[in-house]
Amino acid sequence: MSLFQRARRIDSRARFFVTLLLLVGLVLSSGCSQTEPPADLTIINGVEPESLDPAIITGQADGRVVAGLFEGLTRLNEKTARAEPAMAEKWEISPDGRTYTFHLRTNLLWSTGEPITTADIVYSWIRALDPLTASEYAGQLFYVKNGEAFTTGKIKDPSQVGVHALDPYTLRVELEHPTPFFLDLCAFETLTVVPRQTIQKYGDRWLMADPLPCSGPYRLGYWHLNDKIRLLKNTNYWDAANTQSAIVDMLPVGSPDAALNLYIHGQADIVWDKSLVPTDLIDLLLQRPDFHSFSYLGTYFIRFNVTKKPFDDARVRRAMGLTIDRERIVTKITRAGEQPAYSLVPPGTANYSPLDITNYDPGLARKLMEQAGYKDGNGFPTFEYLFDAPAGGSAKIHEDIAVELQQMWHDNLGIQMNMRQLEWKVYLSAQAQLDYQVMRSSWIGDYNDPNTFLGMFTSTDGNNHTGWKSPSYDALIHDANQEPDARKRAEIFREAEKMLIDEDAPIIPLFYYVGINYFDTNRIQGIYQNVLDMHPLQTIKKIKPPR
Amino acid sequence: MYFVKRLMYAVPLLLIISALAFGLVRMAPGSPFDRERVPASPEIERQLKAKYHLDEPVIKQYGRYLNDLLHGDFGVSTKYRNHTVNDIIEQALPVSMLLGGLAFCFAMAIGLPVGFITAARKGQWPDVIGGLLSLLTVCIPSFVIAPLLILDFSVKWNLLPVGLWGTPARMILPTLALGMFFVGKVARLFREGMISAMQSEYVRAARAKGLGETTLLLKHACRLAILPVVSFAGPMLADLLTGSFIVENIFQIPGIGIFFVNSTSNRDYTMEVGLALLYAILLVLLNLLVDFIYTLLDPRVKYE
Amino acid sequence: MSEPERQHLTPNQRAWRRFRAHRAAVISTWYLAFLLIAIVAWPVVLKCSTANFAHMHDPDQLSDAQFVHPSLQHWFGTDFHGRDLFSRVLYGAQISLMVGIFGAGVSLVIGVLWGAVAGYVGGRLDGFLMRIVDILYSLPSIIFVIVLLSTLGEILKQSHYVTSSPRLAGQLRVILLFVGLGAISWLTMARIVRGEVLSLRSRAFVDAGRVLGAGNRRILFWHIIPNIMGVVITYLALTMPSIILYESFLSYLGLGVQPPMASWGTLMVEGVSQINPIRIYWWLILFPSGVLVTTLMALNFLGDGLRDAWDVKGK
């Protein structure tokens, strides 16, 4: 074989080998460049945060990271999830409950060293209310006087909003009406303090600034989308002495099976998101000591579109509610130890005591249907039950529940239900436009108070999505929110809830959510279960188990 | 010269694709900003839409988009509001490229020899077994293979990590899961190519010249047989480089495949259009590369 | 001494002989026939059997027998809701095969027409049609499919046909899947058909037809298309597996067929979620994927056999 012929033969093979070598080299070199210190704590946080800008986030996973980076006047206590002093050292509340005067600590610093004063707080709150920021949770600041007016553009002058810096360390806040949960709201992410100069310099991409000034117990090491967020201890934090872990990694994982695998292999220390437990294994997993379940401020319920026949008849809706065997659903389908729900507001909600009703009565249901003119289901049209589709490995719990409901309603009332699974955005669209008959729904409380659940169903609230309008319900909610006395307030709310659940029933609650976290209590300290499932990062520590 | 002409043709192609994608993604029902929790005031949603110019007529939006594109700016993602599409592609594409490149090498390294052996021993046992195995890998979906691989290698035998990315050890299972399908495809294509090459007049002439069987197979038939593999390699690489959603999802790899699917489910308009353009650009470049390699391999091929 | 009479075989007969020589293709045909018979016969068996048998094997019947191992009563075991898996696999086969056949059919209709017109007419129309194919090739299919499925779904849902017939509404999803999957598979078919038609149109029989006075449309439909049928059928057999596979990917994303209908794809996704380090219900993944893989392999072998038989070259 001549040299030339040999060379030709080697041609395409050689090219292939060279590429292979190059790639191998790339692999090895990329392996070498990843020498970074391991994290003290690795947490699987749920889905990737859409943003870390406190003003615009809406998701809980986002909120957990933001709570580590930015702080507000108050912060949540790790055990009780109630507000405790943070940036504000102390405060006074006026007797009518509408004016708060906060006194800031004088030693507050950004992670880059500049001092934090009340001007920063005013700036942050006004920014969250600013129409140009388009903050979807601006509603949290509507309790402040003129907050809503400023966002909707009725007033253009920010100085008319009820938050003023009296001096660099004293802040006065005026509210629209007495709000017992306002101090909790001050710990909410939307109200945390953001760095004015960085935002003015970089605009929307201010989170890419390096260094990024942070006001919370941690600062941002780096943020790699779908990879991890690395948080480093902020040594300028006023309480830095009590920050337990110096480096915290937050991993975004969407699939419960992947989360479980990573945890079992020791690549994550904590997994905290109730959707990250493979539902088929829940009963087995909850028997392990490192799986912890706790009451959670959320309810799973069924929505009716009361503008469409036959669901405009309250008797039909109540009848359908009376025939659902919630015990079976929570024991056979969801199996995480959820409590069946016969009312909307979950037990354990602050400032409230729950209604005591148990509504399972197929006999009464059949009578109601007969009164409505559908004896044994005759004449009742076939209807559709909508739910959203699981995607990419997440649980098909809604489908499983739908299958059960279909059978229960058929066997008890003789009515025929068809299931329809919708893609997420299409599902939201159907809900928003009242383009459905019956659909599944749920609600997680924003703050620990019944108003976050009951306020939804007033005629004007955008989250109503049922078409149900009741002037008397609206009046009750309005009165409750104006009432300064806590006990009377709770009473008014109970009356409203009774109207909602027992009499008109535009929704049927099914069960209260249970939060599930998994971590080894022998090795992880400083994390406690609470009804909001919010766990301040700075108190968590990983220790070596005692030998 | 031909290749320069091809590159120039690519520009209107990309323009049409950007327009097509731009209009198409806005046809899907639902808006980028629909959420479970509606903001407290409808004014906020209106402001959000205005911020992204979604309240303007589509043509105007497209004009604005083209203008930004000329400056290399693909726009801000409607879901990850602090990231531009450029940021996301810069972070995620290299990961997918690495994974895709590895899977490609794996597919070639296993597929070509298997195809060769099954063709050389056509009809005998190696062919039957090799043929069955290659077909098998083409028929099993990757979302079945990946968990099975994890189950065996990570869980049962504890040899390899279960997921994430960064060290060479973590790259092995995803490469296998992703590359498996293409191993079979490459093997089958190469085998067919070899068989038809062995019957071609080119090889018959060489045989008549008295060349030995091995030389025939290695030198001549391979050169012909590799052509269908090469032309398949272009689209194959494009699909590999843009990442496989399923493998990335299961192994939690921060690649760009996840964004392809999620951006559509999230109605993230800027991301969808940006990714469609990225895919088209990659495909154009790879097809050009493939055609170039074609000329090197087969002297009969000439482009005007 | 006279030569033995050579048998004159038509091209079809020659093709049939070559097909029969391909053992794998023949075995696959038997398997597919058996599968089809099982799919058609099973509902009949259920109807005619005892009430107990029918009740236990009803694919939609919930029971308390969750996660039962394969046994004499439940040959493939049961799933999370206590439904018999064997029955579900067979009913799922209906859906998967229907999606495969009709999806391939859609790709056939569009692809053959497109490619035949482009190849036959040639010139600028050919260039234009093929440019469109190039452009569509450059769109990432997943984005296109998701947008298509949701947009068409909304449009069709509002249409008169669907609102008047609830049964049609339920099947809307499956119909959308045929259309959607067919819409992304016709591109290759169009290219191949165009290539074939290009080479055929310069052949003698076309000129002969024209001399006899046949118009263009007649030549296209009655002369050219029958001659490319071999190629077309082969690629049909090879497109079906990729469509069925794509449907299973869509099921993984939650976009496949909707409950309560189940396809092999949705069954496999359910089964795969059972693979975890704690405990494994292996039958939920083995049987649906086993049947899917075997069927896809059979279809591929069938396609290979057809391709050998018709002596088709080129991709």
Image (cartoon, coloured by chain):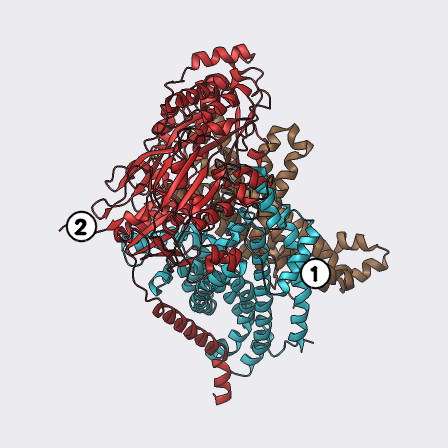
Chain colours: A red, B cyan, C brown
The residue positioned 43% from the left and 74% from the top of the image is: A22
Q: How far apart are marks 2 and 1 (CA)?
A: 68 Å
Q: In this view, does A519 lie to the left or right of B174?
A: left
The residue positioned 68% from the left and 68% from the top of the image is: B9
Asked if residue A222 is positioned above or below residue A330 in the image, the reply reads below
Which residue is nearer to you in this view: A175 or A232? A175
Asked if residue A494 is positioned above or below residue A20 in the image, the reply reads above
Q: What element carries label 2?
A: loop
Asked if residue C101 is positioned above or below residue B296 in the image, the reply reads above
Q: What residue type is labelled 1?
A: Met
* Residue C84 visible at all: yes
The spot of residue A369 in percent (x, y) is 51, 13
Residue at far left of view = A547
Which residue is nearer to you in this view: A114 or C172? A114
Q: Which chain carries label 1?
A: C
The spot of residue A208 in percent (x, y) is 46, 60
The spot of residue C157 in percent (x, y) is 63, 35
Please rate how many residues cluster around mark 2, counting C-alpha atoms within 10 Å: few if below 14, some from 14 to 19, many from 20: few
Find disc 2 in the rendering and name its residue: A545
* Residue C30 visible at all: no
Numbered marks: total:
2
The spot of residue A33 in percent (x, y) is 36, 69
Q: What element carries label 1?
A: helix
Determine if marks 2 and 1 fall on one subunit.
no
Q: Which amino acid does label 2 sit on?
A: Pro
Find disc 1 in the rendering and name its residue: C130
Please rate how many residues cluster around mark 1, counting C-alpha atoms within 10 Å: few if below 14, some from 14 to 19, many from 20: many
Which residue is nearer to you in this view: C192 or C50? C192
